[in-house]
Image (spheres, rainbow, N blue to C red):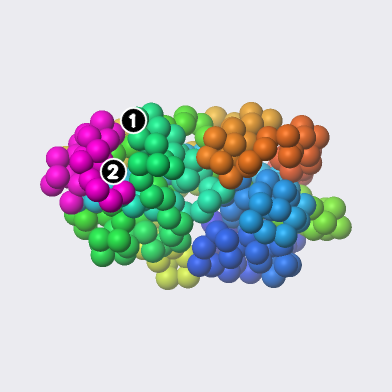
Amino acid sequence: MALELALFARFGLEVELNREVGWATIRDKIIYGELDAAHAPAGTAIAATLGLGCIPTPCVTGLVLNLHGNAVTLSEQLWRDGVRDGGTLRELIGTRAEPMTFGVAFQFSSHNFLLRCWLRANGIDPDRDVRLVVIPPAQMFANLEAGHLDGYCVGEPWNSLAVLSRRGWCVAASEDIARNHPEKVLMVREDFAEERAPEHVALVAALLEACRFCDQPENRERVIETLALPEYVNAPIHALRMSMCGSFDFGHGRIEKYPDFNVFSRNGANEPDARKAAWVLDMMERSGVLPDRSLISASTVQRIFRTDIYDSARTLLAARGASI
């Protein structure tokens, strides 16, 4: 939306958007300088800095782009088998000789963390009772439809696409699993943030203004229509609308009010503060992707989640009198 609303240009920036196939690709392109900045799962900046699954590369974020936005989807076959919630899923798992397979979008993303939390809360051991596999978000639905997955945790619209096609149904939204959890961040290499600081702050300011625009209910239809375009999400507009208009269709007649299914600005969403960093670290440790919490010090966390950059962007916004 920052591009569509000419916010980048307002801050003197020329920005080219590139759609990538998955989060590991985005991480690697940041590391090797093929991308200057990226929309990325909150855990990615920490993982890249520590060299978890990649070459150690100091990365930072000066902006959290949103809270929530995900759901856990189960296959229609599981519904036919009598599953209605986590408890009945646990009972069915106990009768199976082979483990069920569930998809997550990235090892270091909230999708992995949230699914594990939901499974554990329902007495299911994510490392023993089921099999978790990494699948790019846009490929989740196709794998569910083909029978390769019994379920998944992913962002929208890939849950709603399953509901609309009656190939799956949602059993939980991320707001229910971990309220106010950070989702995506703006991720850059630390050297980019230092060497091109004015551009970086301007970039954060433009995106912060875009976040404010996206959070306004009266703007949601324009956001939905933009996301549906082939160069962006390229998904059915009805699927995109299902989580963006204040209610959410879980499938099988369950429609509930969810005004905070997607939070882009309100509730202090955008500040990369210590509380959000702590949640990400806790989830990384509990999921096993961070083998030793002592690998990362408090000072290192502060160098990754940069409230100073965020504050500079807010100051720039105030000085410009920026408003949509």
Q: Find numbered disc 1 in the image and state the secondary structure of the residue it sits on.
A: loop
- Residue assigned mark 1: 122
| Residues in magenta, as a range | 77-99
Residue 306: % across, % down: 75, 40
- Is 117 situated left or right of 322 in this image? left
Describe residue 275's horizontal placement relative to residue 95 as left or right: right
Q: Which residue is mark 2?
A: 170
Across and down, in percent, residue 275 comes to: 64, 29
Image coords of residue 28 (percent x, y): 65, 64
How crowded pointer 2 is (Cα within 10 Å; few <14, some 14-19, many 20+) is rated as: many
Residue 93 found in image quarter: top left
In the picture shown, does residue 63 fall above or below 202? above
User: Which residue, as the protein is rendered here, is positioned at the far front?
Assistant: 97
Q: Quadrant of residue 280?
A: top right
Left or right placement of residue 137 versus residue 297 in this view: left
Q: Could you give the CA–CA distance between mark 1 and mark 2, rounded to whole angstroms?
A: 15 Å
Image mark for residue 281: none
Q: Could you tell me if residue 6 is visible in this image?
A: no
Tell me: residue 116, above or below residue 239: above
Check disc 1 and give the amino acid type: Asn
